[in-house]
Image: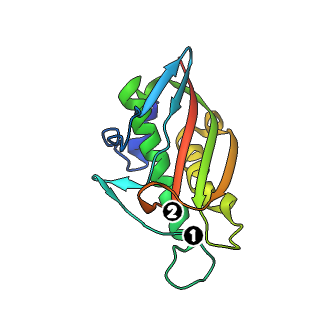
Amino acid sequence: MTWTERLGELGITLPPPAAPVAAYVPAVRNGNLVYTSGQLPIVDGELTLHGKVSDGAEGVVEPAEAKAAARQCAINALAAINGLVGVDSVVRIVKVVGFVASAPGFTGQPGVVNGASEFLGEVFGDAGVHARSAVGVAELPLGAPVEVELVAEVG
């Protein structure tokens, strides 16, 4: 089974790579590695969530919402890879870095970034097991609550 077929089983069609919002490209290949730029939770050209992540504070993004947004970021990262070399060329996911716009006192960044990691496991199985960083930050581009980048080995 190809990765494209696996995505289809999960009901996912990769979108076109998200258009850069500054001076960069969605993904770059160096040897057998593809590095994606940071991907935001964008669907149909629109950011799906805005704000900082917190546990229970009024007017902020709930961790479960941010986790779902991290999943969308991973879908967009795969779209960037697909646009450069084709997702079926992925051998394994090597590294995931997730940034979480965090309200003061929020320490649940790993749980948020699990949205990306768990999704990659669903798609790639053992080839989706990766090294990872989950980092809390003050702000993200466009007011996004989460941003994900990844490194993939390709054949």
Residue at x 36% of width, y 30% of height: 83
Q: Is mark 1 on a helix, strand or loop?
A: loop
Which residue was labeled with disc 2? 145
- Left or right of 83, for residue 60: right
Q: 10 Å neighbourhood of mark 2: few (<14), some, or many (≥20)?
A: many
- Left or right of 109, for residue 65: left
Which residue is situated farthest in the left direction here? 44
Residue at x 30% of width, y 39% of height: 16
* Amino acid marked by disc 1: Val
Q: Do the residues labelled 2 and 1 touch (CB within 8 Å)?
A: yes
Residue at x 66% of width, y 73% of height: 104
Q: 10 Å neighbourhood of mark 1: few (<14), some, or many (≥20)?
A: many
Q: Please, is residue 95 above or below residue 62 in the view? A: above
* Amino acid marked by disc 2: Pro
- Left or right of 17, for residue 51: right
Residue at x 54% of width, y 41% of height: 149
Which residue is situated farthest in the top direction here? 31
Which residue was labeled with disc 1? 53
Q: Position of residue 72 (x, y in %)?
A: 45, 53
Q: Where is residue 20 in the image (x, y as percent from the top left)?
A: 36, 40
